[in-house]
Amino acid sequence: MLKKFVTCIYLLHGNAVKSLENADVISDTPVLLAEKYDNDDCDAIIIYDMSNGDAEHEESLDIIKDICGKVSCDVYGAGNVKRMEDIKKLLYAGCKKACLNFSKQENIDILQEVSEKFGKDKICICFTETDKISAYEDNICKYSDELILLNSSEIKKTPDINMPTILNLPDLSLDKMIGLLSQSNVSGLSGNAINVNSSEIRNMKNICAENNLAVSRMLPQYKWEDLKKNSEGMVPVVVQDFRTDEVLMVAYFNEESYYKTIETGKMTYFSRSRNTLWLKGETSGHFQYVKKLTADCDMDTILAKVKQIGAACHTGNYTCFFNDIAGKKYAEKNPQKVLDSVFSVISDRKINPREGSYTNYLFEKGLDKILKKVGEESTEMVIAAKNENSNELIYEMADFLYHMMVLMAEKGISWEEITDELARR
């Protein structure tokens, strides 16, 4: 079992506060805080929704959805769970797991129901007393995937629990970290102890590895000696946005920058003009966080997929490749780019109506008309699928996708939200 370092966001009135017991605001932008934790290499983020009332709860769900769309790590949703519908909303927002608070009887009562509906791998249980876990041990093992202990005073009793358990801690020493993670049932550490030390997560993982504890970290599959260097003893790096595949820039690794990039998770190059190591974003704040490094067939060039903060180019452009030299007119074939382009036109029609536009006609008629057309096009698509020749089906599918995108624009849904949801499945 890989040992996890799990950060927390305690969500109240749209802000991230210090803890479940302390409402002091630590960030008024929880999404940015979540991105920081993700960039610091946390393995998961637990979001505790502390909102009051249905309206604030819905606002919190929107924030949770935004966080799930921005981070790469797993997100656990907790708090304000009273019925199956609340679990569904957390999972639909993009959470990897939804948490049941076992200090509430109504949460205990719905465990089996929500587990059978969504799968036990989607259900996590928060608890403060180990006695409660012992009382319901059989059901917990059968219908949930992981536990979160919120009460640090109960930690001494955790060896008796036969389930993967994340421990929520107020503080942490290195010796205590190794001791706790050495327990076979402890799946991770969380709480303020990890939040305040999030920038040290990579170092803590290295210490764990040195103590024979399995953790998730980037390790090079190829040594520097395995790569073919150019005449200057370096390897060129083509840098690409991990979401859009847009090429951002080209730079160079030497041996030190190669290993430094893997160690820190931030793209670090060798500057030939300054003859020194160059941490991208050190002065501008436009860091590049590593998602994947891949060598080409000749082992002499590296493709880096990164999460780009701000602009990649010193000119302020997002990519360094913006000076068109020559070209021919061509039809874009990349499916995502085509869909994005069409959706962009549809969205623009909603903001800037054009006389005679069929898209504007649909927007003017409203949601019911749009839904009617989506229904009609889906039916025509089904009928076309019964024909042997696929040409008509392709045409009807394109019609359906167009009307679906009109509906997306009407409801404020983006392609990125849909592709993120597909990627999670």
Image (tube, rainbow, N blue to C red):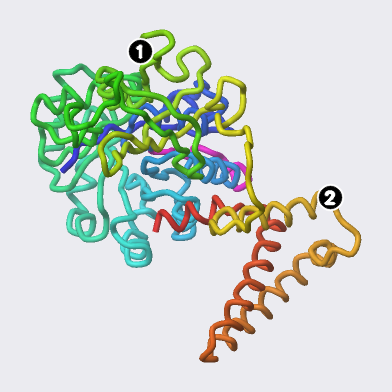
Q: Which mark is residue 277?
A: 1
Q: Nearer the viewer, mark 2 or mark 1?
A: 1
Residue 401 image position (x, y, % from top left): 62, 68
Q: Could one spot residue 170 in this view of the protein?
A: no
In the image, 7 versus 68, the foreground residue is 68
In the image, 131 versus 304, the foreground residue is 304
In the image, 30 versus 279, the foreground residue is 279
Residue 381 image position (x, y, % from top left): 60, 81
Q: Is residue 181 left or right of residue 106?
A: left
Q: Which mark is residue 2?
A: none
- How packed is label 1: few (under 14 Cα within 10 Å), some, or many (20 or more)? some
How far apart in space, not on screen, are marks 2 and 1 (Cα)? 48 Å
Give the secondary structure at mark 2: loop
Circle 2: residue type: Asn
Give the secondary structure at mark 1: strand
Q: Report which residue position mark 2 lands on.
A: 352
- How packed is label 2: few (under 14 Cα within 10 Å), some, or many (20 or more)? few
Image quadrant in which the C terminus is located: bottom left
The stretch in magenta equals 46-56
Image quadrant in which the N terminus is located: top left
